[in-house]
Amino acid sequence: MLSVFWAVLRRDLLLAFRQRGVLVHHLLFFVLVVALFPLGTGASPSILVTVSPALIWMSVLLAALLSLQRLFKPDYEDGTLEQYVLSPEPLAVIALAKVLAYWLASGLIFVLASPLLVLLLGVPVGAVPVIMASLLLGTPTLGLVGAIGTALTLSLPRAGLLLSLLIFPLYVPVLIFGAGAMRAAIEGLPAAGALYLLAALLMLGISTAPFAIAAALKISME
Amino acid sequence: MKRPRLGIRNLSCGRGENALFQGLDISLVGGEAARVLGENGAGKTTLLRTLGGLQAPLTGEVVWESARDTGAVDDPVLLQDELCFVGHDNALNAALTPVENLDVLMRLCGRRVAPGRIRDTLAELGLKRLAHRPSGRLSAGQKRRVSLARLWLTDAPLWLLDEPASALDVDSRALLCARIAAHVAAGGIAVFTTHEALTLADVPVRSIELLPC
């Protein structure tokens, strides 16, 4: 079971490395949304700091939506997904490996890029650790929940819109607590409560989403 | 040694209410091959996918009796543990090399194969120089050969092959036939669909005819 987990994880990380142009696209999208926003609001620092939690989290959500559409699609198109389903190993383990590889190659990069972006928006340096922690706990949940949606819409031709309708409502708790932790940190209030809730959501996601993804993949294969 | 057996009982397959074929009954034991016959759209691919457990039958059941233990089971996971499925698509990622692709495909079936053996097999199939090139740059026939290389690497007793000879040249087709015949002669079962004639020397080839209903 572990052997398959590592094999799939290694394969997807290798693929992400070979196709690193795609990663750069998603990162650029994230950076551009955040960088263009001040041009629309006017450069009043107080406004930027106030809206920065919403801005950062919305751009993370949009970038996730953009990148998630390719999570299972290539495997579905070239027949590898058939082999995943036919594997005697549990499909949920393979699904978890794929989501982990996806997160390491996209979510983690957003987390690492976030300090620069929030400082650009004028957020105090003291809030940066909490902001990174909130993204670190929140982005894997976005990947897990989003993977259920992509797996369900895999066999549909224009799945993008349906995917956003399916998964954005499910992203609401992560958005509320993620942006909540950021806001608390900026205002110098304790953010531990929101971070704990993000961690709880992540645990719930890790323990249940792989099974939902596996079931959705099997439905899409029929 | 006990011989494995693939039993198909009263099988109907299709989508929703529409059955493609009905009431298929056949039992294959180790040492037999079966060729699935039927016109386009008769349900040949659907039959193979159902046998492998990728899709549920409308009625009937697929029973796999392993040579390893006693008793018949209709649990698809036990069958999948002893299955090599070469589908219509090659299951090769364009950005990975043939060696990398085959390594992952074999691990997915729970079998770990040394990279050296994968390279040797590819060399046997005339793909030595292409072993470390991205699979996306290979021709259709070369991709098919890489995908079929699994048949040389696996020890699974049950093979389900969907149009294995598509895009293959004459020499590769002869290699493929020899490999299937050797597998069946060694006590394995192979079920395949094909439009080109595949001649398997010295092994019984049964026919599964799918009639539209």
Image (cartoon, coloured by chain):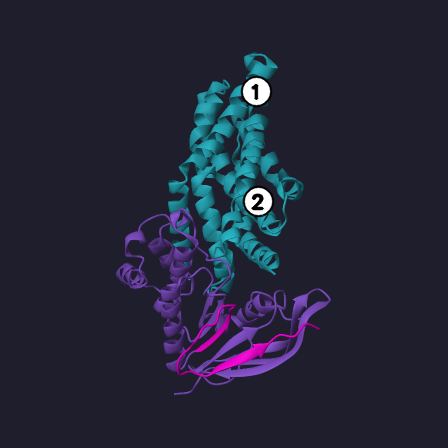
Chain colours: A cyan, B purple
Under tag 1, what secondary structure? helix
| Subunit that carries the residue with mark 2 | A
Please name the residue shown 57% across and 82% down the image. B26
User: Looking at the image, which is closer to me, A205 or B129?
Assistant: B129
Q: Which residue was labeled with disc 2?
A: A146
Image position of A47 with respect to B126: above or below = above
Q: Quadrant of the C terminus of chain B?
A: bottom right
Contact, CB < 8 Å: mark 2 with mark 1? no
The answer to which quarter of the image holds residue A200 is: top right
* Left or right position of B10 against B112: right
Residue neighbourhood size for the residue with mark 2, other residues' Cα within 10 Å, grouped as few (<14), some (14–19), many (≥20): many
Under tag 2, what secondary structure? helix
Give the CA separation, mark 2 to mark 1.
25 Å
Residue A193 visible to an observer of this rendering: no
Dominant SS of magenta comes to loop
Type of amino acid at the residue the image marks with label 1: Phe
**Residue B195 among magenta residues:** yes
Type of amino acid at the residue the image marks with label 2: Gly
Q: Provide residue A153's location: percent of width, then percent of height.
A: 62, 49
Please name the residue shown 33% across and 55% down the image. B99
Q: Quadrant of the N terminus of chain B?
A: bottom left
**Residue A195 among magenta residues:** no
User: Which numbered tag is attached to residue A207?
Assistant: none
Q: Provide residue A44's location: percent of width, then percent of height.
A: 57, 11
Please name the residue shown 41% across and 40% down the image. A19
The answer to which quarter of the image holds residue A6 is: bottom left
User: Looking at the image, which is closer to me, A162 or A122?
Assistant: A162
Residue B25 visible to an observer of this rendering: yes
Image position of A88 with respect to A49: above or below = below
Bounds of the magenta span? B189-213
User: Which numbered tag is attached to residue A37?
Assistant: 1
Q: Provide residue B38's location: percent of width, then percent of height.
A: 60, 71
